[in-house]
Image (cartoon, helix red, strand yellow):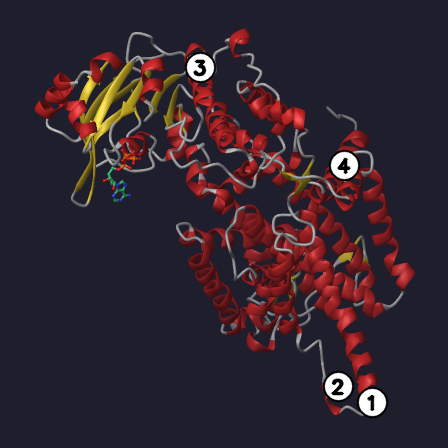
Amino acid sequence: MSNSPLERAQDIAGDIAGGIAGDIAAPTTARPQGRFAAIRARVASEQFRPYLLTGILIAALAFPYLDGNEGDIDAAANALSYAMLALGLNIVVGFAGLLDLGYAAFFAIGAYTYGALSSYQIQPQWSSFWEPFQWLGLVQHLNAEGGAGTVHFDVSFWLMLPISALVAAFFGIVFGAPTLRLKGDYLAIVTLGFGEIVPIVARNTPTITNGAQGLSGVNTPKFFGYDFGVLSTPYYYCGLVLIVLLIFISTRLKQSRVGRAWLAIREDEIAAEAMGVNRTRLKLLAFAIGAGFAGVTGTFYVAKLQTASPEMFMFPVSVMILVMIVLGGIGSVAGVVIGALLLQLLQSWFLQDLTQWIHALGKLTGIEFLQRIDLVQSIELIFGIILVVMMLYRRQGLIPERTAVTALTYEQQNAMPSRSEVEAGLAPLHRRTIDPGRPLLEIKGLAKSFGGIKAVNRIDLDVMPGAIVAIIGPNGSGKTTFFNLITGLIRPDGGHVLLAGEDVTGLKPHRIADKGIARTFQNLRLFPHMTLLENALVGAHTRTSTGAVGAVLRLPRVKREEAAARARALEIIRIFGNRLMPRLQHLAFSLSYANRRRLEIARALVSEPMLLLLDEPTAGMNPTETLELADQIRQLRQRGVTILLIEHKLDVVNEIADKVIVLDHGEKIAEGTPKQVHSNKEVLRAYLGRTTDAVAAAAAAS
Ligand SMILES: Nc1ncnc2c1ncn2[C@@H]1O[C@H](COP(=O)(O)OP(=O)(O)OP(=O)(O)O)[C@@H](O)[C@H]1O
């Protein structure tokens, strides 16, 4: 733990460098490292980080003195603004996976918030109401001679940075709320609409924005009496400070509980919610923080230009920022900054020069067409070409969010599965006290119909603590629907679900996960582009509490919580021995099918469930793996977890279940020990599709 200011500063610097370097060498699937990958890993290594940071900082600080050209410094300051916007959009699109095509709206809101409160645009009549604000130095009293006079807003640039961020964040929530149920193209269309509306409103609200003519005479920032004025250098340095701050915030958020929850939502919303992530809140948080970044940038940009007009915030700006993050690498903090700087500098430095060279070539060769080319005007076409090329050849961007990890050696791949500390430790897997005398799960008359199909028809079930109860039944008999009703993915039409005596019927999935029910899915719902360890850590979401502010400040409490969650995740992963342990940094999609099943169980266990619902856990496993998992499931029971499992392999059911219930056409047709159920005629009929008499006759004949 670092306590001294110097240590804290080193910590923060390490985080920023780590964020950049970490993005450069973040893990992806196991594949052999090439020479370039080795160099990149070296660049991103712990030892190299301070040098990387120092080198970048020195170069950035020295740039205005080395270059000395006012136009270049101005272009660099503008590029920093766009990098700030790209970082904000990256939170929404890259982290949370919400395709926002109207991001420039928040840039506009930030810009007009500062512009309106730091210019002569709004001048209400003076009254005593304004005196406290005058005392605080936020307004001035003008033209007092001939009457009451007017108010001149003169709010400091520095104060307006957080205020604009908050105002934009507020609008982020307002615009984000109606889009919560939308995804992909639909979300893009609605956000595009918001992006169009804001400049139109700005154009048609002349009292605040001065309409199409735009605001003018916006105050320039002052720093301890030094006026930034119209020269570019102070803006460049201010932009530099802001970008470092925003990189820092982005990096810390990404590496936190909040960041993992965003990535989980991006990867699979339903699985994220089943693991305890409140997707409504986290999506709104992403919209708010992303918009906040744009609010800060809007203030900076307008202070620099001293004007704001609706044309500055139209759709092409949103597209340009999106292209920047696609070019750099969606989700990669370092990538989006580099993507934004490259594209913006390409526009303002390279394309202008290239246009002049082409004109010169045109004159030299006498080709008229070449003399008329203006590449700066064709920027949208160039963006389009860049996007197409990236999609064809490097979808993951210049600095992908994930790069290669070292492949496992032949020995590691073939190591015998060493069993975990399950046998050794036997520590309980959850911390709640359960009354052993009453059912942990009580289901009363649970029912759900889809149109005419009664998928679950008034089922009753009691599951005692520490039991393993298997649910079997033919395909389409309602087993998965039954699980979905218990875990809140579907609201029941009738009936009740009680967990340890508490009614949890109809609660949202994340609330049910919080109460102590975790599940796996029949069709595997992992977070494919997150590492094995990150997947497991999402399971800890509901048992941890760090919010966005905590994640950014990373105070000792947050560090302790994160360390405990990691330790817990590792402890659970160890249950599966070296099936999972050597692959902690591998992306989930790269794991074998059986390992993905194990990881799903591990992720569920990290949430410390009292009740674990396993939907066909051994599906796709060979006989050895099936036996191994059956053994592990039994061990989980010894560690205090009650288990309800859907299973088609009857030998597994016979082996581990205390009780079996059989569903057919949504109804419970039998309940008892595996032996009792196997000899039940109704069950035979349901499975074999014959009349009981025919079954009996067949049995007699054999
Ligand atoms: N969202 C839905 N909309 C309409 N019908 C549904 C929906 N979900 C399930 N059903 C129907 O409800 C019935 C029960 O389906 P469910 O998936 O629960 O069965 P299951 O026993 O889990 O089958 P399987 O073993 O094949 O997974 C089926 O007839 C199915 O078609």
**Alpha-carbon span between mark 1 and mark 4:** 54 Å
Residue at the disc numbered 1: 365
**Alpha-carbon span between mark 3 and mark 4:** 44 Å
| Label 4: which secondary element | helix
Give the crowd class for mark 2: few <14, some 14-19, many >=20 residues within 10 Å.
some
Residue 683 point in image, percent of width and height:
18, 23
Mark 1 or 4: in front is: 1
Residue at the disc numbered 3: 631
Residue 60 point in image, percent of width and height:
83, 53
Q: Which mark is residue 682?
A: none
Give the crowd class for mark 3: few <14, some 14-19, many >=20 residues within 10 Å.
some
| Label 2: which secondary element | helix
**Alpha-carbon span between mark 1 and mark 3:** 81 Å
Q: Residue furthest right?
A: 66
The answer to whether residue 139 shows anywhere in this view is no
Disc with the residue nearer the chain's start (2 vs 4): 4
Disc with the residue nearer the chain's start (1 vs 3): 1
Q: Which amino acid type is shown beneath numbered disc 1?
A: Thr
Residue at the disc numbered 2: 370
Image marks 2 and 4: residues in contact by CB distance under 8 Å: no
Identify which residue is drawn at 74% across, 56% down: 239
Q: Is residue 623 above or below residue 341?
A: above
Q: Is residue 381 above or below residue 485?
A: below
Mark 3 or 4: in front is: 3
Q: Quadrant of residue 665?
A: top left
The answer to whether residue 578 shows anywhere in this view is yes
Q: Quadrant of ligand 1?
A: top left
Placement of the C terminus among the 4 image quadrants: top left
Image marks 2 and 1: residues in contact by CB distance under 8 Å: yes
Identify which residue is drawn at 30% across, 38% down: 490
